[in-house]
Image (spheres, rainbow, N blue to C red):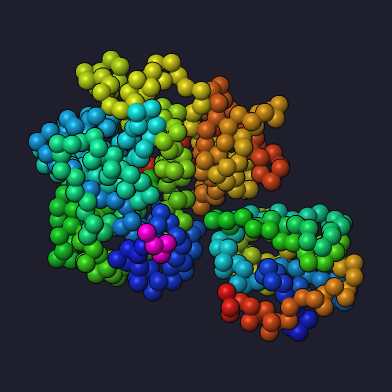
Amino acid sequence: MSNVKYSESHEWFSVNGDEVTVGITEFAQSQLGDVVFVELPEAGTELSAGDEVAVIESVKAAGDISLPFAATVIAINAALPDEPELVNSDPMGAGWFMRVRPENPADLDNLLSADAYAALVDSE
Amino acid sequence: MSNEARKTPLYDLHVELGGKMVPFAGYAMPIQYRAGIVQEHLHTREAVGVFDVSHMGQLVVSGSDAATALEKLLPIDVQALEINQQCYAVMTSETGGILDDLIITRWAENEFFLVVNAATAAADIAHLQQHLRGCDIRVLGQQALLAVQGPKAGELIGELAPATRALTFMHGTRVELFGTDCYVTRSGYTGEDGFEISVAASAVESVARKLLEDGRVQMIGLGARDTLRLEAGLCLYGNDMDSSTTPVEASLLWSIAKPRRADGAKAGGFLGADVVLGQIAEGVARKRVGFSVEGKIPVRAGADVIDEAGDVVGKFTSGGYGPTLGAAIGMGYVDRGYEKIGTGLQALVRGKAIPIVVARTPFVPQRYYRG
Protein backbone atom coordinates (compact mmCIF):
# COMPACT_ATOMS: atom_id res chain seq x y z
CA MET A 1 0.00 0.00 0.00
CA SER A 2 3.02 2.28 -0.36
CA ASN A 3 1.38 3.98 -3.34
CA VAL A 4 -1.47 5.36 -1.20
CA LYS A 5 -1.18 9.00 -0.25
CA TYR A 6 -3.33 11.20 1.98
CA SER A 7 -4.55 14.76 2.35
CA GLU A 8 -4.89 16.81 5.50
CA SER A 9 -8.64 16.88 4.86
CA HIS A 10 -8.77 13.07 5.25
CA GLU A 11 -8.99 11.84 1.67
CA TRP A 12 -6.86 8.95 0.38
CA PHE A 13 -5.34 8.74 -3.10
CA SER A 14 -4.28 5.37 -4.46
CA VAL A 15 -1.84 5.93 -7.32
CA ASN A 16 -1.79 3.39 -10.14
CA GLY A 17 0.17 4.56 -13.19
CA ASP A 18 -1.37 7.83 -14.35
CA GLU A 19 -4.66 7.11 -12.59
CA VAL A 20 -5.56 7.94 -9.00
CA THR A 21 -8.46 6.40 -7.04
CA VAL A 22 -9.95 8.75 -4.43
CA GLY A 23 -11.88 8.05 -1.23
CA ILE A 24 -12.17 9.16 2.39
CA THR A 25 -10.20 7.60 5.20
CA GLU A 26 -11.33 5.37 8.05
CA PHE A 27 -10.86 8.34 10.38
CA ALA A 28 -13.04 10.55 8.17
CA GLN A 29 -15.88 8.03 8.01
CA SER A 30 -15.77 7.49 11.78
CA GLN A 31 -16.01 11.25 12.32
CA LEU A 32 -18.86 11.66 9.85
CA GLY A 33 -20.95 8.78 11.16
CA ASP A 34 -23.61 7.01 9.12
CA VAL A 35 -23.36 8.20 5.51
CA VAL A 36 -26.79 8.50 3.89
CA PHE A 37 -26.11 10.39 0.67
CA VAL A 38 -23.25 10.76 -1.78
CA GLU A 39 -23.22 13.01 -4.82
CA LEU A 40 -20.52 12.33 -7.41
CA PRO A 41 -19.34 14.30 -10.46
CA GLU A 42 -19.78 13.02 -13.99
CA ALA A 43 -16.98 11.20 -15.74
CA GLY A 44 -15.14 13.69 -17.93
CA THR A 45 -15.44 16.57 -15.46
CA GLU A 46 -12.29 18.67 -15.43
CA LEU A 47 -11.33 19.98 -12.03
CA SER A 48 -8.96 22.64 -10.80
CA ALA A 49 -7.06 22.17 -7.57
CA GLY A 50 -9.37 22.84 -4.63
CA ASP A 51 -12.62 22.36 -6.56
CA GLU A 52 -15.37 20.67 -4.60
CA VAL A 53 -15.86 17.40 -6.45
CA ALA A 54 -18.24 15.30 -4.33
CA VAL A 55 -20.70 15.78 -1.48
CA ILE A 56 -21.07 13.38 1.43
CA GLU A 57 -23.96 13.68 3.85
CA SER A 58 -24.17 11.72 7.06
CA VAL A 59 -27.12 11.67 9.42
CA LYS A 60 -25.56 14.49 11.40
CA ALA A 61 -23.55 16.58 8.93
CA ALA A 62 -22.69 17.45 5.36
CA GLY A 63 -19.14 17.25 4.08
CA ASP A 64 -17.39 17.51 0.75
CA ILE A 65 -14.38 16.19 -1.08
CA SER A 66 -12.04 18.47 -2.93
CA LEU A 67 -8.93 17.47 -4.82
CA PRO A 68 -5.69 19.21 -3.91
CA PHE A 69 -4.57 18.96 -7.56
CA ALA A 70 -6.02 19.58 -11.03
CA ALA A 71 -7.41 16.43 -12.63
CA THR A 72 -10.01 14.94 -14.94
CA VAL A 73 -12.60 12.50 -13.59
CA ILE A 74 -12.40 9.25 -15.55
CA ALA A 75 -14.73 6.98 -13.57
CA ILE A 76 -17.03 7.10 -10.57
CA ASN A 77 -18.19 4.43 -8.11
CA ALA A 78 -21.70 3.94 -9.47
CA ALA A 79 -22.67 1.83 -6.43
CA LEU A 80 -22.35 4.72 -3.97
CA PRO A 81 -25.53 6.73 -4.69
CA ASP A 82 -27.62 3.62 -3.95
CA GLU A 83 -25.39 2.21 -1.21
CA PRO A 84 -23.82 5.20 0.56
CA GLU A 85 -23.25 2.99 3.62
CA LEU A 86 -20.28 1.44 1.74
CA VAL A 87 -18.36 4.56 2.76
CA ASN A 88 -18.73 3.47 6.41
CA SER A 89 -18.28 -0.27 5.97
CA ASP A 90 -15.31 -0.20 3.58
CA PRO A 91 -13.97 3.35 3.15
CA MET A 92 -10.62 2.25 1.71
CA GLY A 93 -12.15 -0.37 -0.60
CA ALA A 94 -15.72 -0.70 -1.93
CA GLY A 95 -16.48 2.79 -0.63
CA TRP A 96 -14.15 4.52 -3.11
CA PHE A 97 -15.51 7.66 -4.76
CA MET A 98 -13.88 8.15 -8.15
CA ARG A 99 -10.86 7.62 -10.37
CA VAL A 100 -9.14 10.69 -11.75
CA ARG A 101 -6.23 11.48 -14.04
CA PRO A 102 -4.06 14.25 -12.56
CA GLU A 103 -3.03 17.01 -14.93
CA ASN A 104 0.45 17.07 -13.45
CA PRO A 105 1.51 13.84 -11.69
CA ALA A 106 4.21 15.73 -9.80
CA ASP A 107 1.43 17.42 -7.78
CA LEU A 108 0.97 14.11 -5.94
CA ASP A 109 4.37 14.54 -4.33
CA ASN A 110 2.87 17.23 -2.10
CA LEU A 111 0.46 14.75 -0.46
CA LEU A 112 1.07 13.08 2.89
CA SER A 113 2.66 9.66 3.27
CA ALA A 114 0.86 7.00 5.32
CA ASP A 115 3.13 7.72 8.29
CA ALA A 116 2.65 11.47 8.09
CA TYR A 117 -1.11 11.00 7.87
CA ALA A 118 -1.16 8.61 10.83
CA ALA A 119 0.70 11.23 12.87
CA LEU A 120 -1.85 13.86 11.83
CA VAL A 121 -4.78 11.66 12.92
CA ASP A 122 -3.07 10.93 16.24
CA SER A 123 -2.80 14.63 16.90
CA GLU A 124 -6.54 15.24 16.26
CA MET B 1 -19.70 32.16 34.04
CA SER B 2 -17.14 29.66 32.86
CA ASN B 3 -17.16 28.44 29.29
CA GLU B 4 -16.60 24.91 30.48
CA ALA B 5 -19.49 22.65 29.51
CA ARG B 6 -21.47 21.32 32.44
CA LYS B 7 -21.61 17.58 32.95
CA THR B 8 -24.64 15.51 33.80
CA PRO B 9 -24.23 12.81 36.48
CA LEU B 10 -23.94 10.25 33.65
CA TYR B 11 -20.93 11.90 31.99
CA ASP B 12 -18.49 9.15 32.98
CA LEU B 13 -20.87 6.44 31.80
CA HIS B 14 -21.27 8.21 28.43
CA VAL B 15 -17.51 8.33 27.95
CA GLU B 16 -17.12 4.71 29.07
CA LEU B 17 -19.70 3.64 26.47
CA GLY B 18 -17.84 5.47 23.69
CA GLY B 19 -20.13 8.48 23.64
CA LYS B 20 -18.98 11.25 21.31
CA MET B 21 -19.38 14.24 23.60
CA VAL B 22 -20.50 17.51 22.04
CA PRO B 23 -21.58 20.83 23.53
CA PHE B 24 -25.37 21.11 23.78
CA ALA B 25 -27.24 23.83 25.71
CA GLY B 26 -24.21 24.39 27.93
CA TYR B 27 -23.71 20.70 28.68
CA ALA B 28 -21.32 18.07 27.32
CA MET B 29 -23.73 15.52 25.89
CA PRO B 30 -23.28 12.34 23.81
CA ILE B 31 -24.37 12.86 20.19
CA GLN B 32 -23.91 9.12 19.62
CA TYR B 33 -22.22 6.05 21.04
CA ARG B 34 -20.19 3.43 19.18
CA ALA B 35 -23.23 1.96 17.40
CA GLY B 36 -23.96 5.21 15.56
CA ILE B 37 -27.09 7.27 15.04
CA VAL B 38 -28.87 4.98 12.55
CA GLN B 39 -28.49 1.81 14.64
CA GLU B 40 -29.42 3.68 17.84
CA HIS B 41 -32.51 5.10 16.16
CA LEU B 42 -33.63 1.72 14.82
CA HIS B 43 -32.96 0.04 18.17
CA THR B 44 -35.29 2.53 19.89
CA ARG B 45 -38.05 1.76 17.37
CA GLU B 46 -37.59 -2.00 17.95
CA ALA B 47 -36.68 -2.48 21.62
CA VAL B 48 -35.70 0.00 24.36
CA GLY B 49 -33.46 3.06 24.19
CA VAL B 50 -32.29 4.95 27.29
CA PHE B 51 -31.56 8.66 26.92
CA ASP B 52 -29.85 10.93 29.43
CA VAL B 53 -32.02 14.04 29.51
CA SER B 54 -30.66 15.26 32.84
CA HIS B 55 -29.70 18.56 31.22
CA MET B 56 -33.38 19.50 31.08
CA GLY B 57 -34.73 21.74 33.81
CA GLN B 58 -36.92 20.19 36.51
CA LEU B 59 -38.96 22.67 38.54
CA VAL B 60 -41.73 22.54 41.12
CA VAL B 61 -44.29 25.33 41.33
CA SER B 62 -46.43 25.32 44.45
CA GLY B 63 -48.79 27.62 46.34
CA SER B 64 -52.44 27.85 47.28
CA ASP B 65 -53.15 29.66 44.02
CA ALA B 66 -50.72 27.73 41.79
CA ALA B 67 -53.21 26.27 39.29
CA THR B 68 -54.92 29.59 38.60
CA ALA B 69 -51.60 31.42 38.54
CA LEU B 70 -50.07 29.00 36.02
CA GLU B 71 -53.01 29.56 33.70
CA LYS B 72 -51.76 33.14 33.26
CA LEU B 73 -48.67 31.73 31.56
CA LEU B 74 -49.84 28.47 29.97
CA PRO B 75 -52.82 28.27 27.58
CA ILE B 76 -53.99 24.95 28.97
CA ASP B 77 -56.64 23.90 31.50
CA VAL B 78 -54.31 23.55 34.50
CA GLN B 79 -57.21 23.34 36.95
CA ALA B 80 -58.65 20.34 35.12
CA LEU B 81 -55.45 18.27 35.48
CA GLU B 82 -55.91 15.32 37.79
CA ILE B 83 -53.21 14.50 40.31
CA ASN B 84 -50.41 12.63 38.48
CA GLN B 85 -51.79 13.69 35.09
CA GLN B 86 -49.53 15.67 32.78
CA CYS B 87 -49.94 17.94 29.79
CA TYR B 88 -47.78 19.45 27.05
CA ALA B 89 -47.83 23.25 27.11
CA VAL B 90 -46.24 26.19 25.37
CA MET B 91 -45.32 29.16 27.54
CA THR B 92 -46.39 32.27 25.67
CA SER B 93 -44.93 35.77 25.76
CA GLU B 94 -46.84 39.04 25.84
CA THR B 95 -46.70 39.11 22.03
CA GLY B 96 -47.88 35.51 21.69
CA GLY B 97 -44.43 34.08 20.94
CA ILE B 98 -43.30 30.78 22.41
CA LEU B 99 -40.85 31.28 25.30
CA ASP B 100 -40.52 27.53 25.80
CA ASP B 101 -42.43 24.29 25.54
CA LEU B 102 -42.70 22.06 28.57
CA ILE B 103 -44.47 19.19 30.26
CA ILE B 104 -46.44 20.02 33.40
CA THR B 105 -47.57 17.34 35.86
CA ARG B 106 -49.92 17.90 38.77
CA TRP B 107 -48.20 16.39 41.80
CA ALA B 108 -50.79 17.60 44.32
CA GLU B 109 -53.75 19.94 44.45
CA ASN B 110 -51.40 22.92 44.76
CA GLU B 111 -48.13 21.49 43.47
CA PHE B 112 -46.95 21.18 39.87
CA PHE B 113 -43.83 19.56 38.37
CA LEU B 114 -42.45 21.18 35.21
CA VAL B 115 -39.83 19.79 32.82
CA VAL B 116 -38.41 22.55 30.63
CA ASN B 117 -35.74 22.82 27.94
CA ALA B 118 -32.14 23.15 29.11
CA ALA B 119 -31.29 26.18 26.98
CA THR B 120 -34.29 28.14 28.27
CA ALA B 121 -34.37 26.94 31.90
CA ALA B 122 -32.80 30.05 33.44
CA ALA B 123 -35.07 32.42 31.49
CA ASP B 124 -38.09 30.25 32.33
CA ILE B 125 -37.35 30.44 36.04
CA ALA B 126 -37.01 34.23 35.89
CA HIS B 127 -40.26 34.45 33.94
CA LEU B 128 -42.11 32.26 36.44
CA GLN B 129 -40.72 34.25 39.38
CA GLN B 130 -41.78 37.52 37.76
CA HIS B 131 -45.35 36.43 37.00
CA LEU B 132 -46.15 34.00 39.83
CA ARG B 133 -45.34 36.16 42.83
CA GLY B 134 -47.58 34.23 45.22
CA CYS B 135 -46.04 30.86 44.32
CA ASP B 136 -42.94 29.06 45.48
CA ILE B 137 -40.65 28.06 42.59
CA ARG B 138 -38.16 25.36 43.41
CA VAL B 139 -35.43 24.08 41.06
CA LEU B 140 -34.74 20.37 41.46
CA GLY B 141 -31.03 20.80 40.85
CA GLN B 142 -30.15 17.43 42.34
CA GLN B 143 -32.53 15.42 40.18
CA ALA B 144 -31.47 13.60 37.01
CA LEU B 145 -33.83 12.56 34.22
CA LEU B 146 -33.79 9.41 32.09
CA ALA B 147 -36.03 8.74 29.11
CA VAL B 148 -36.70 5.04 28.52
CA GLN B 149 -38.32 4.71 25.10
CA GLY B 150 -39.42 2.01 22.71
CA PRO B 151 -42.03 -0.68 22.10
CA LYS B 152 -40.53 -2.93 24.81
CA ALA B 153 -40.25 -0.14 27.42
CA GLY B 154 -43.69 -0.96 28.84
CA GLU B 155 -42.85 -4.59 29.60
CA LEU B 156 -39.35 -3.71 30.88
CA ILE B 157 -40.42 -1.02 33.34
CA GLY B 158 -43.53 -3.06 34.19
CA GLU B 159 -41.32 -5.97 35.30
CA LEU B 160 -39.27 -3.66 37.52
CA ALA B 161 -42.17 -1.67 38.93
CA PRO B 162 -45.56 -3.38 38.36
CA ALA B 163 -47.43 -0.21 39.36
CA THR B 164 -46.31 1.39 36.09
CA ARG B 165 -48.31 -1.14 34.03
CA ALA B 166 -51.49 0.78 34.76
CA LEU B 167 -50.01 4.08 33.58
CA THR B 168 -51.41 5.44 30.35
CA PHE B 169 -49.78 8.10 28.17
CA MET B 170 -49.24 11.39 30.03
CA HIS B 171 -49.72 9.99 33.54
CA GLY B 172 -47.17 9.48 36.29
CA THR B 173 -46.61 7.69 39.57
CA ARG B 174 -44.00 7.46 42.30
CA VAL B 175 -42.34 4.04 42.39
CA GLU B 176 -39.11 2.35 43.41
CA LEU B 177 -36.75 1.18 40.67
CA PHE B 178 -33.89 -1.01 41.94
CA GLY B 179 -34.67 0.25 45.44
CA THR B 180 -34.42 3.90 44.41
CA ASP B 181 -37.34 6.31 44.75
CA CYS B 182 -38.32 7.63 41.28
CA TYR B 183 -41.10 9.67 39.73
CA VAL B 184 -42.04 7.85 36.53
CA THR B 185 -44.29 9.25 33.81
CA ARG B 186 -45.52 7.51 30.68
CA SER B 187 -44.24 10.07 28.20
CA GLY B 188 -41.35 10.90 25.95
CA TYR B 189 -40.33 12.55 22.72
CA THR B 190 -39.65 9.73 20.29
CA GLY B 191 -43.19 8.85 19.20
CA GLU B 192 -42.80 5.47 20.92
CA ASP B 193 -44.35 4.18 24.12
CA GLY B 194 -42.01 4.91 27.01
CA PHE B 195 -41.26 6.63 30.28
CA GLU B 196 -39.40 9.55 31.74
CA ILE B 197 -37.83 8.80 35.09
CA SER B 198 -36.90 11.57 37.49
CA VAL B 199 -34.35 10.17 39.94
CA ALA B 200 -31.80 11.61 42.37
CA ALA B 201 -28.57 12.61 40.63
CA SER B 202 -26.65 10.51 43.16
CA ALA B 203 -28.56 7.35 42.15
CA VAL B 204 -29.00 7.80 38.39
CA GLU B 205 -25.78 6.10 37.33
CA SER B 206 -26.64 2.97 39.28
CA VAL B 207 -30.19 2.94 37.83
CA ALA B 208 -28.87 3.45 34.28
CA ARG B 209 -26.26 0.68 34.66
CA LYS B 210 -28.87 -1.75 35.96
CA LEU B 211 -31.22 -0.91 33.08
CA LEU B 212 -28.35 -1.52 30.63
CA GLU B 213 -27.81 -5.03 32.01
CA ASP B 214 -31.05 -6.01 30.26
CA GLY B 215 -30.50 -7.27 26.72
CA ARG B 216 -33.34 -5.16 25.37
CA VAL B 217 -31.72 -1.92 26.49
CA GLN B 218 -29.16 0.34 24.84
CA MET B 219 -28.01 3.91 25.53
CA ILE B 220 -29.03 6.36 22.80
CA GLY B 221 -27.46 9.72 22.02
CA LEU B 222 -28.80 13.12 21.04
CA GLY B 223 -28.38 12.43 17.32
CA ALA B 224 -30.94 9.64 17.34
CA ARG B 225 -33.13 11.60 19.75
CA ASP B 226 -33.32 14.25 17.01
CA THR B 227 -34.10 11.84 14.14
CA LEU B 228 -36.70 10.02 16.29
CA ARG B 229 -38.54 13.20 17.25
CA LEU B 230 -38.42 14.49 13.67
CA GLU B 231 -39.99 11.28 12.32
CA ALA B 232 -42.59 11.60 15.09
CA GLY B 233 -43.38 15.12 13.84
CA LEU B 234 -42.42 16.73 17.17
CA CYS B 235 -41.02 20.27 17.35
CA LEU B 236 -37.60 21.11 18.71
CA TYR B 237 -37.61 24.37 20.66
CA GLY B 238 -35.11 26.84 19.22
CA ASN B 239 -35.32 25.20 15.79
CA ASP B 240 -38.96 24.75 14.90
CA MET B 241 -40.36 27.44 17.15
CA ASP B 242 -39.08 30.21 19.39
CA SER B 243 -40.13 33.55 20.83
CA SER B 244 -40.71 34.91 17.30
CA THR B 245 -43.28 32.24 16.42
CA THR B 246 -46.72 31.81 17.92
CA PRO B 247 -48.39 28.47 18.70
CA VAL B 248 -50.80 29.07 15.80
CA GLU B 249 -47.95 29.62 13.33
CA ALA B 250 -46.13 26.60 14.80
CA SER B 251 -49.21 24.41 14.13
CA LEU B 252 -49.52 23.75 17.86
CA LEU B 253 -53.16 24.82 18.02
CA TRP B 254 -53.96 21.47 19.69
CA SER B 255 -51.92 22.64 22.68
CA ILE B 256 -54.35 25.52 23.34
CA ALA B 257 -57.06 23.98 25.50
CA LYS B 258 -60.64 24.44 24.29
CA PRO B 259 -61.72 26.34 27.45
CA ARG B 260 -58.96 28.89 26.80
CA ARG B 261 -60.08 29.70 23.24
CA ALA B 262 -62.39 32.53 22.22
CA ASP B 263 -65.65 30.67 22.85
CA GLY B 264 -64.36 28.75 25.90
CA ALA B 265 -65.47 28.90 29.54
CA LYS B 266 -62.28 30.75 30.58
CA ALA B 267 -61.29 32.30 27.26
CA GLY B 268 -57.92 34.04 27.05
CA GLY B 269 -56.31 35.18 30.27
CA PHE B 270 -52.80 34.05 29.28
CA LEU B 271 -49.93 36.21 28.07
CA GLY B 272 -50.31 37.06 24.40
CA ALA B 273 -53.90 35.79 24.30
CA ASP B 274 -55.08 38.70 22.15
CA VAL B 275 -52.51 37.84 19.48
CA VAL B 276 -53.01 34.07 19.67
CA LEU B 277 -56.83 34.14 19.73
CA GLY B 278 -56.79 36.75 16.95
CA GLN B 279 -54.66 34.44 14.81
CA ILE B 280 -57.00 31.52 15.48
CA ALA B 281 -59.87 33.66 14.20
CA GLU B 282 -58.12 35.30 11.26
CA GLY B 283 -55.42 32.86 10.24
CA VAL B 284 -51.69 33.41 10.00
CA ALA B 285 -49.29 34.52 7.27
CA ARG B 286 -47.05 31.45 7.68
CA LYS B 287 -47.45 28.03 9.15
CA ARG B 288 -45.27 25.10 10.21
CA VAL B 289 -45.67 22.01 8.02
CA GLY B 290 -43.91 18.71 7.41
CA PHE B 291 -41.91 18.10 4.22
CA SER B 292 -41.13 14.85 2.48
CA VAL B 293 -38.13 15.11 0.19
CA GLU B 294 -37.84 13.31 -3.13
CA GLY B 295 -34.73 11.17 -3.36
CA LYS B 296 -32.19 10.64 -0.63
CA ILE B 297 -30.56 14.05 -0.36
CA PRO B 298 -30.90 15.43 3.17
CA VAL B 299 -32.37 18.94 3.27
CA ARG B 300 -31.29 20.60 6.48
CA ALA B 301 -32.48 23.45 8.70
CA GLY B 302 -32.03 26.80 6.99
CA ALA B 303 -32.73 25.59 3.44
CA ASP B 304 -35.02 27.95 1.52
CA VAL B 305 -38.28 26.64 0.07
CA ILE B 306 -39.26 28.01 -3.35
CA ASP B 307 -42.34 27.79 -5.53
CA GLU B 308 -42.51 27.09 -9.27
CA ALA B 309 -41.63 30.68 -10.10
CA GLY B 310 -38.50 30.43 -7.94
CA ASP B 311 -39.82 32.79 -5.26
CA VAL B 312 -38.90 31.97 -1.67
CA VAL B 313 -42.10 30.91 0.13
CA GLY B 314 -40.68 29.14 3.15
CA LYS B 315 -37.75 27.69 5.06
CA PHE B 316 -36.72 24.39 6.64
CA THR B 317 -36.32 24.58 10.43
CA SER B 318 -35.44 20.88 10.88
CA GLY B 319 -34.46 18.31 8.35
CA GLY B 320 -32.42 15.26 7.63
CA TYR B 321 -32.51 11.55 7.09
CA GLY B 322 -35.22 9.52 8.79
CA PRO B 323 -33.68 6.09 9.46
CA THR B 324 -37.02 4.27 9.94
CA LEU B 325 -38.40 5.78 6.73
CA GLY B 326 -35.11 5.41 4.84
CA ALA B 327 -35.85 8.79 3.33
CA ALA B 328 -35.14 12.47 3.81
CA ILE B 329 -37.78 14.45 5.72
CA GLY B 330 -38.09 17.81 7.37
CA MET B 331 -40.32 20.50 8.79
CA GLY B 332 -40.43 24.22 8.44
CA TYR B 333 -42.57 27.22 7.67
CA VAL B 334 -44.41 28.09 4.45
CA ASP B 335 -46.35 31.20 3.51
CA ARG B 336 -50.13 31.12 3.61
CA GLY B 337 -51.53 29.30 0.61
CA TYR B 338 -48.78 26.67 0.47
CA GLU B 339 -49.64 24.75 3.64
CA LYS B 340 -52.00 22.18 2.12
CA ILE B 341 -50.89 18.54 2.37
CA GLY B 342 -49.64 17.42 -1.03
CA THR B 343 -48.47 20.86 -2.21
CA GLY B 344 -45.43 20.42 -4.44
CA LEU B 345 -42.52 22.81 -3.77
CA GLN B 346 -38.75 22.80 -4.01
CA ALA B 347 -35.95 23.17 -1.49
CA LEU B 348 -32.64 24.78 -2.34
CA VAL B 349 -29.63 22.64 -1.44
CA ARG B 350 -26.24 24.01 -2.56
CA GLY B 351 -28.04 25.99 -5.25
CA LYS B 352 -29.90 22.97 -6.59
CA ALA B 353 -33.71 22.77 -6.47
CA ILE B 354 -34.82 19.52 -4.81
CA PRO B 355 -38.51 18.52 -5.20
CA ILE B 356 -40.38 18.35 -1.88
CA VAL B 357 -44.02 17.84 -0.91
CA VAL B 358 -45.91 19.27 2.07
CA ALA B 359 -46.55 16.11 4.09
CA ARG B 360 -48.76 14.94 6.92
CA THR B 361 -46.97 14.48 10.25
CA PRO B 362 -46.07 12.34 12.11
CA PHE B 363 -44.03 10.67 9.38
CA VAL B 364 -43.89 7.49 11.49
CA PRO B 365 -47.09 6.61 13.42
CA GLN B 366 -46.95 7.47 17.13
CA ARG B 367 -47.35 4.41 19.33
CA TYR B 368 -48.23 5.87 22.72
CA TYR B 369 -49.86 3.57 25.29
CA ARG B 370 -53.39 4.77 25.88
CA GLY B 371 -54.69 1.68 27.72
Residue at 69%, 82% (x, y): give it: A116
In front of the other: A53 or B361: A53
**B129 shown above or below B16:** above
Q: In this view, does B309 lie above or below B33?
A: above
Is residue A65 visible to the viewer in this orientation of the structure? yes
- The vertical placement of B173 against A96, above or below, is above
In-image side of B240 versus B214 (left or right): right
Q: Is residue B294 left or right of residue B352?
A: left
Pick the quarter of the image with the N terminus of chain B: bottom left
**Where does the image place residue A17, in percent across and percent down from the top left?**
87, 77
Q: Where is residue B46 in the image (x, y as percent from the top left)?
A: 39, 56
Q: Where is residue B239 in the image (x, y as percent from the top left)?
A: 47, 43
Viewport quadrant of the C terminus of chain B: top left
In the image, taking residue B61 as reference, residue B45 lies left or right, namely right
B3 in the magenta segment: yes
B88 inside magenta stretch: no
Asked if residue B164 is positioned above or below residue B179 in the image, the reply reads above
Residue at x 14% of width, y 36% of height: B134
Q: Main secondary structure of the magenta part?
A: loop
Q: In which quarter of the image is residue A27?
A: bottom right
Residue at point 51% right, 43% down? B318
Which residues fall within the magenta stretch? B1-5
- How far from the left and from the top, in percent, is residue B213? 29, 70
